Image (cartoon, grey):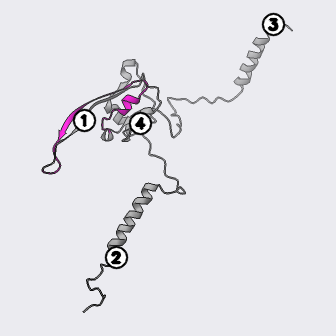
Amino acid sequence: MAPIPGSGLAKGLAVTLRTMTKKTVTEQYPDAQPDLPPRTRGVIGLFEENCTVCMLCARECPDWCIYIDSHKETVPAAAPGGRERSRNVLDRFAIDFSLCMYCGICIEVCPFDALFWSPEFEYAETDIRDLTHERDKLREWMWTVPAPPALDPGAEEPKEIATARKTAEKLAATQAAPAPSDDPQGEES
């Protein structure tokens, strides 16, 4: 059967008329800030004090958008007769958000909890070269990271905490117990 000429136009106009009568759900974004979900992936914040320059985040990044520069510094011996140690000092930590695909691998592999998701999403630039943000900007975003969710009150206590608590209780019990006397018969003279 041949289609009736103009039936496609009539169907399109019917859809338009139906949607014109419904209430709009558009949010006026610049004037009204959106209500973001708690685990929103905006930008990556850097907690610089925890960064040991291990380079895991840069090595595991599939886009190679993390740039880290460091130098070694000699730390004097902590005790007399000890040997000097060397440690890495962070010189540059930058993320190129024009390359980043927001996969979160860098945050997952960081063994020292130096990288976190921040819900900030308003960091647009007029030039793509300005999307490489250095550590000072990443540090600013760190303070917008929400606190972790509270632990479930009905959850089982973690094994590490339970073991530490039991050890502390045993130590407190041995310190509180009276010291045995030197007399083998237990009599006082």
- Asked whether, in this view, residue 137 is left or right of residue 145, the answer is left
User: Which x, y percent locates residue 97?
Assistant: 41, 25
Q: Of callouts 1 and 2, which one flags the residue occurring earlier in the amino acid sequence?
A: 1
**Closer to us: 151 or 60:** 60
Q: Amino acid at mark 4?
A: Val
Q: Of callouts 4 and 1, which one flags the residue occurring earlier in the amino acid sequence?
A: 1
How many angstroms separate mark 4 from mark 1 (CA)?
Answer: 20 Å
How packed is label 4: few (under 14 Cα within 10 Å), some, or many (20 or more)?
Answer: some
**Closer to us: 125 or 117:** 117
Q: Amino acid at mark 2?
A: Ala
How many angstroms separate mark 3 from mark 1 (CA)?
Answer: 74 Å
SS class, disc 1 = strand
SS class, disc 2 = loop
Circle 2 residue = 177
Q: Which mark is residue 147?
A: none
How many angstroms separate mark 4 from mark 2 (CA)?
Answer: 46 Å
Residue 55 in magenta? yes
Seen as rendered, the residue at the extreme left is 81
Residue 127 visible from this viewpoint: no
Q: Nearer the viewer, mark 3 or mark 4?
A: 4
Question: What's drawn in magenta, residue-wise?
Answer: 51-80
- Asked whether, in this view, residue 182 is left or right of residue 148, the answer is left
Circle 3 residue = 5
User: Which x, y percent locates residue 140?
Assistant: 35, 36
Q: Amino acid at mark 3?
A: Pro
Q: Of callouts 3 and 4, which one flags the residue occurring earlier in the amino acid sequence?
A: 3
User: Which x, y percent locates residue 75?
Assistant: 18, 42
Dividing the picture into quarters, in which one does residue 179 lie? bottom left
Q: Nearer the viewer, mark 3 or mark 1?
A: 1
How packed is label 3: few (under 14 Cα within 10 Å), some, or many (20 or more)?
Answer: few
Circle 4 residue = 109
